Image (spheres, rainbow, N blue to C red):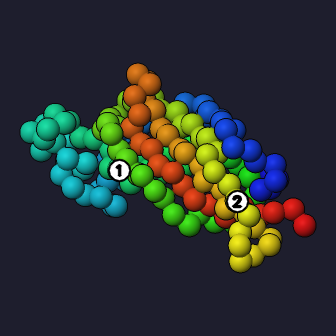
Amino acid sequence: MRRYEDLFIGETGRSETLTVDREEMLSWAAVYDPQWFHADPEKAKKSVFGEVVASGIYTAALWRRLDHEINKDVDFICGVAWKETRWPKAVRAGDTLYATSEVIEKRPSKSKADRGIVTFRYQLFNQHDEAVFSCESVNLVQRSA
């Protein structure tokens, strides 16, 4: 596992792609975010989107799934904050998404010598290279002994 010392500012990564499945998106919305424009295809035709679109939280979950391809070898302790979180474009069924990751800041913890604080800029893009989700995530990462 890569530790705090192994990460460097400017380090980037990119995931493989994932295509958004309509039935999975609708099933998730029905349970976790049943707003009509996420969960009801007929009513959603009258929305500003013209069809059902993915919930922002579902979009973030898809990003997380893809980010694990990029950063699965980082020895994370946990995440502690998201800053500048945005959903600039709706995700639709059939969209093909990929995630990117960049280390933008790091510093040793002032209170615990066994960890460092690493901030990543995460983004999720659709097949047109349009950003559909972004955030800066502050994470605790294990330091080498």
Mark 2 nearby-residue class (10 Å; few <14, some 14–19, many ≥20):
few
Q: Residue at x 48, y 58 (%)?
A: 82
Q: Secondary structure at mark 1?
A: helix
Q: Quadrant of residue 134?
A: top left
Closer to us: mark 1 or mark 2?
Answer: 2
Amino acid marked by disc 1: Gly
- Seen in the picture, residue 55 relative to 140 is either above or below; the reply is above
Give coordinates of residue 122: x percent, y percent. 53, 44
Whole-number angstrom distance, CA of label 1 to CA of label 2? 30 Å
Expressed as whole percent of the image width and height from the top left, the position of residue 13 reads 65, 35
Classed neighbour count for the residue bearing mark 1: other residues with Cα under 10 Å, few (<14), some (14–19), many (≥20): some
Disc on res. 106: none
Q: Please, what secondary structure does the residue beneath circle 2 have? A: strand
Q: Quadrant of residue 89?
A: top left
Residue at 37% x, 47% y: name it: 86
* Residue where numbered disc 2 is placed: 107
Residue 96 screen position, x and y as percent? 45, 29
Q: Position of residue 98 (x, y in %)?
A: 52, 33
> With 19 as the anchor, is 30 left or right in this view?
left
Residue at mark 1: 56
Q: Give the quadrant of the C terminus.
A: bottom right
In the displayed orientation, state which residue is furthest to the top. 128
Query: Between disc 1 and disc 2, whose residue precedes?
Result: 1
26 on left or right of 10 = left
